[in-house]
Each structure stands twice: as structure tokens, then as C-alpha cells.
Amino acid sequence: MNALVPLPVLLPLCVTGLKLAIGPRLQRFQRFISLAVLGAVLVLSVLLMIAADRHGPLSVHLGDFAPPIGITLVADRLAGLMLTVSSAVTLLVHVYSLGQGMADRDDQTPVGVFHPAYLILVAGVSCTFLAGDLVNLYVGFEIMLVASFVLLTIGGTATRIRAGSTYVIISLFSSVLFLVAIAMTYAFAGTVNFAQLAGRLQEAPDGARTLLEAMLLTVFAIKAAVFPLAAWLPDSYPTAPAPVTAVFAGLLTKVGVYSMLRTQTLLFPGHRLGDLLMLAALASMVVGILGAVAQTDLKRVLSFTLISHIGYMVFGIALAGRGSISGAIVYVAHHITVQTTLFLVAGLVERRDGTTELTRLGGLAKSAPLVAVLFFVPAMNLAGIPPLSGFIGKVGLMRAGIDNGGGWAWALVAGSAATSLLTLYVMAKVWNLAFWRDAPPGAEGEGVVLESAGDEPGDDGDDEEDEGDPAAGAGRGLPVPAGAVVSAGLLGQSITTTKRLPWPMLLATGAAVALGLLYTVLGGPLTTFTEAAAAELLARTPYIEAVLGR
Amino acid sequence: MTVSLSLLVAAAVLAAVGGTLLLTRSLTRILLGAVVLGNGVNLLVLASTGSAGDAPLLYPHVIRNRVTDPLPQAIALTAIVITLATTAFLLAMAYRSHQVTGSDEISDDTEDRLVALRAEFLDRRGELRDRYREDRADGGTSPEQRARYRDARRRLRKRVREERAYQARANDVSGNLWNDILGADPEDYREGRERGTTDATGRPGPAPARVAGPSNDPEETGREPDSRPGEDSCHPSPDQPDDPGGAGTEGTR
């Protein structure tokens, strides 16, 4: 069983090589192997999750080099669950991207870029989930990031290059910071293996531990887009093609959350930066959702809710109790699925109407009822309406906060309740503007002036002067150029809108919605599983024994 | 563990230089910053070995405990490779940015910029008007003052127009697939610009014509070309009915 552990990383990488070797030929075969490998990764992940649940963490020393020299991969309950959820989501997004006709245009390009980059991204994500040491975690991040650079700037249009530069520079900086943290860890402990570090960092001086903890937290907070370090996200995500944004929103930030969860529980138990983390969590939740309230573009709204809801997971990590960690894990699984689904729906809307600008949309509930349903369910799920999985996650976290009983914990509980309500408000706003109201008169083709620089009505004093000036009042209408987000397909061309949506897109989105509902149906087993995962994380010995031997 | 001070100082200096360069706007400088910063951190990783010893080769008669720890070297090697990949990507991006927008500078977040621009515009206009009214209340205005006022307003509007044109250009979706993927030959590009299918180069200024290309159909994008050279003095606006044909162009943004 242990031999299966490296496969979620290896398979996508090997298939990428194969695809690059084949080149632009054999389109059908290429599509088939992409789907096949993603399906295989999903099956493997489920197997790993079940095995980790039954027999404890599985670990592999690659090349049979013992730590600290060798590379260690570990699959415990948490890693298994994350792998399963992420591979299910990547498979669905892949089906969606095939439907969007992205792959169809590959024969026009020198090398099909999207699919290889996508598979490498999947490999990188798997690698971070399975990493058993800091360096391998770093490498996993880098694999993922380099692939994400390509995906984010794909097509090379001006908007995407601009958005991509911010993203690349921020990622670069956080990677460098990560490397510094690794160097310092090694200097302190003489190892980078998590299991060995868990023991050795206990003996390290307090100042050193706090320094390492702060550095690693900063790195992961940048990746996870926790509030003060989140400004890059709404700037860069919305410009990418819908499937890319969806998979980024679902997975990339959660990889940061996962790393935070892993290092905080394993390396820094009883951590002293808990208060700081709680503050960051609270600020993320509140500032993020207030940002979302102010936006008028669906993709930007969703980007801000993403930042806001990262706060919930950090909340769970900061409390560091069994219940809160369990709640955070449920929330990660729920949020990966729901956020991805919402971005996929945004893609459907964009596909249908050519824009995601809320001021231009309208009447979708009548004209596209299926899309409306597909939006409504995950939107309510995100807000945490009772039977849905968002509710389960939020209740778990809030209960953990109340049990904790500290001042910060109460503040966080209050903050998360307020955020939840505001999320509902934001989603209702989107629903009303895009789906429920009648289509605005200018919606077809001609577009709308979005905002005007409100000239005060009493501007009559100098009218006679203005008459002499032919361009007087040119600033009055001050129209906003397309609200920054332009609908563009994978290759940067303006998107083709079709009133009939391709069935794979609808199927994939529907399946993602169903996956979100499945968490509710399987709520009992899911929470039992996450409770066990949290206990395993906090106990630490199963992980350490699995890696180092008894 | 003893660490070589010179190694640490070198790492710190490189990191400082790299960090400073990273804060600039030009992508080329950022690229250099990334390289320098990466090297500085690699030195730091090497410094985590402690003092240097013998080469870590396990041939016979080597004294094991005098050998340098090879693990940081392996980590540094990995980091070098990754820095190389990122550098290559940044280089390509700087080139592409130069191709598309005519400069490799990173512009602000468009939304941020819009908010800032609008606030600034309203402020400045209000200020101008107040001053003008004061002048008039003080006992009439001279033609010279009136001209100055008009001039100031015109300059302000011009700035807004330039900004808008720049943003419209930055938002553009180019129609030419091959040029998007491969990067066009300079010849193709010039030709394309004359035909108006590719992005024009140049910083803010009167925007060059952006006539919609084949797949840049206004029906699809809901956008039309912004301003054209020669229309400098008169930019149409929807609430300006005395401008012939103005509303049509402006309303489509």
C-alpha cells in the first residue's frame, strides 16, 4: 500500500511528459489520457484516504534514503482527505475546460499549453499534500506555482500579463522567504524532515522557535491570502479563464491553509502566535467580506469572499483545539468545492452573456434557470444556510470557539457570525442583480455606463464658460472602462458567447454542486473522519512513528 | 556551529539589493532583483552548513566528520534551478509586456486606479471651480482669467482621457492568436498595427486607433475603440448631446 503514495505526484508528471512528446497531434487521445490520469489520481487518493484511516499514516522514503537525507512522502488522514477533495475538483474542472472548447483550439497553437500546465499543477498540489519535509513542501509549492504562472498568463493578453506580474512577484517573494525559513530551520535543527523537526524543535530556544513559526506563518499566509497579505488575490485571479480561476480559488489558497495546519500542529504545538493568528483570521473575515460587498463584478465578488472565508480556516487553526481543527478541516473540504463551483458558474454566466459585470447582467433566472439553480445552491452553501455543508463547518468552528471561551475566541465567533450574514447579503445581492431582476435595457450588446462622477446639480454658475468649451463636461460621465475584467477565453481571445451552453460545462458544474451536497449527506461520517484526523494531528505520535519507525 | 561572517554579510547585501530592485516598477529591474535576491538566499542556505570542511565525496580514506554537510548544497541546487525557471518566465513576461503595452512597467490594480483617479479628478475640478467663482465674486473675471480656467480644465480632462485610453488599451484582448502565443515578428506587428488588429505600443498619450479586429468584434466584447488620434480636443461623452455622434461611442464602454 505504501508504494501507492508517490503515484498522485508521479502519474500527472509522467503523462505531462507524454503529452509534450506527442505534441499537437492525436487530440482525442490526449484528452482521453488527461481524463484517465485525473480519474486515476482520484481513485488513488480515495484508496490512500481509506488506508490511512484504517492503518494509520503511510510513509515512503524515496530511494530508501532514511531521513534527513531522503525525500519522505507521508499520507495521513488529513493528506488523504485533501488529496481526495482536490483530485475530485481538478477532475471536474478538467471536464469543464474541455467543454469550454479550450482544448479544441489546441491544434492552432504550437504546443498545447493548457493541459500539460494543468497536469503539472495537479502534481504540484499533490506533492505539497504528501510532503514529509520542508524542502519537499517548498518544491511542491514551486511546481504548483510555475504551472500557475503559465495558466494565469495564458494567451498573454495585456490584462493577464499585468495581473500575472503581480502574482509572479508576490509568489517569488514568498518562495524566497520560505527558502530563508528552510535555511534557518536547518541551521537550528540539522534536519528539514517534519517528524524529526517535531522532536528537535521542542528543544530549540524559545526565540528561535517563535522566529521560525513567524516566518513559516508569513509564507503560508501569503499563499493562503490571509488578510494583510491578500491584496494580490483579487487583483490577479479574476482575469484568468474561468476554469483556471476556479481551480486556483479552490486549491492554491487551500494548499497554504493545509501547510499552516500541518506545521502548526506538528512543529509548533502550543504555539505562541495564536493570538496573532486569531487577529489575522478576524481581519480576513471582516475585511474580505466588506470588500466583496463593494464589488460589482461577479468574479471580483467571489475573489473577496474567498479571502474572507480563508479567515474561518485560520480561525480553526488558531484555536488549535481538537474541535476547532476538525472544524477547520471540514471547512477546507467544503470551501474547496463550493468556491470552485461558484467560479465555474461565473464561467457559465460569462460564456452565456459575455460578461460577469453585475450591472450588465439580469434576468438569468428566467432565461437560464439551470444556471440560476447551479448558482443558488453553492451560494447558499457558502453563506452557511442550515442543511448545507457550510453550516456544518461554521457550526463546528463556532462551537469550538465557544468551548474555548477566551476573549479572542468570542470575538472570532461574533466575527464569523457577522461574516456569514454579510456573505448571505453579498450572495443575495448577486442573485438579485444577475438572476432575479429583469435584464437591464442596455444589456444586449451596447453596454452600460457603469459609474458616473456625480456632477452636482447646482453647477450652473459657470455654464456660460462651459458653452465656449466644446469638450466641457467630458469628465461628467466618466465611464469606467469595462470594470477591469474582460471576458476572454483560454487563449486570450474575446470569449465566444453561446446561449446554449456546452453540456460538459453544465455537467461538470452540476457534479461540483452535487459534490457540495454530498458533504451534507455524508455529514456524519465526514465529521467523524475529521475528528479522527484532528486527533491524529494533535497527538503527533502516529505521524512521527510512521516516518521514523517505532 | 560557526558560520562564516563574510558569507552572511554577502547574503545580506545581496538580499538588500535584490529586495530594493524588487520594489521598482520595471519588470526588467524586478527580474534582476529576483536573480540577486535568489543568489543571496542561496548563500544563506549554504551558510547554514556551518564552517566549510572537505568536499563531501565518499572516496576511501576520507575522514567522515571533516566532510561538509552536503544537504544544504542539495537544497541550494534545487533553489537555483527553481530561480532559473522563474527568471526565464519573468523574462518572457517582461518581453511580452513590452510587446503588448509598449513598456515593461507594471501598472496599478485597475480598480484601485479608477477609484484614485475619480477622487483626484473631482477634487481638482472642485478646486478649480471654487477658485474661479471666488475670482468672479471679487469683481468679474478678465478674459485672461477665463482662458486660464478653461485651460486648466482642459488639461485635467486630457489627463483623464489619457488614463482612460491607457486602461482601455491595457484591457484589450488581442485578436491575433499566433501573435499571442508566439509573439509576432516586428514586421508583422507594424503591419498589424496599421491594419489595427494588434495592440499598439506607446505609453499614455492620445490613444492610437484601436479599430476592432476580426475577432475583436464589438458585438462580442461589448466594447469599441477608445479615442483616436486627432480627436484629442473633443472626447465624446453621453451627457453631451451637442457633440455629434458622441453618445454612441461612449455608451459602449
Image: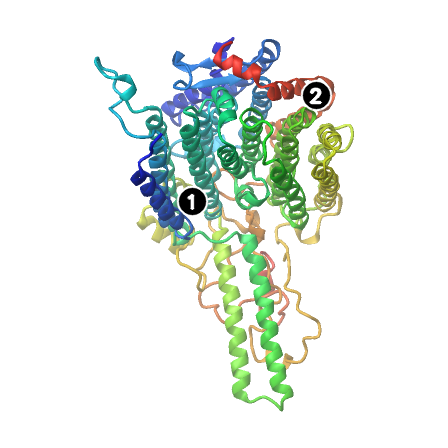
Residue A112 visible somewhere in the drawing:
no
Letter of the chain that mark 1 sits on in the rendering: B
Determine which quarter of the picture holds residue A350.
top right
Residue B251, image x, y percentages? 61, 59
- Seen at 45% across and 32% down, the residue is A147
Q: How is the image coloured?
A: rainbow
- Relative to A326, residue A278 above or below: below
Pick the front one: A159 or B128: B128
Secondary structure, mark 1, is: loop
Placement of A457 over or under B172, stated as above or below: below
Above or below: residue A12 compared with residue A502: above
The residue positioned 60% from the left and 17% from the top of the image is: A77
Query: Which of A319 and B228 lies nearest the eye of the viewer?
Result: A319
- Which of the labelled discs sits on residue B176, or is there none? 1
Residue projecting furthest to the right:
A386
Residue annotated with mark 2: A527
Amino acid of disc 1 = Asn
Q: Are marks 1 and 2 in contact (CB under 8 Å)?
A: no
What residue lies at 24% left-to-right and 24% top-to-bottom? Answer: B54
Q: Amino acid at mark 2?
A: Thr
Label 2 chain ID: A
Task: Give percent across and percent down for residue B230.
Answer: 45, 68
Quarter of the picture containing the C terminus of chain B is: bottom right
In the rendered image, residue A313, in percent from the top left (x then y), is placed at 64, 33
Indicate left or right for B177 with A396 as reference.
Answer: left
Q: State the image coordinates of residue A331 (x, y, percent, origin top left).
A: 66, 29
Helix, strand or loop status at disc 2: helix
Disc 1 versus disc 2: nearer the observer: 2
Left or right of residue A472: residue A176: left
- Say whether residue A207 is left or right of residue B74: right
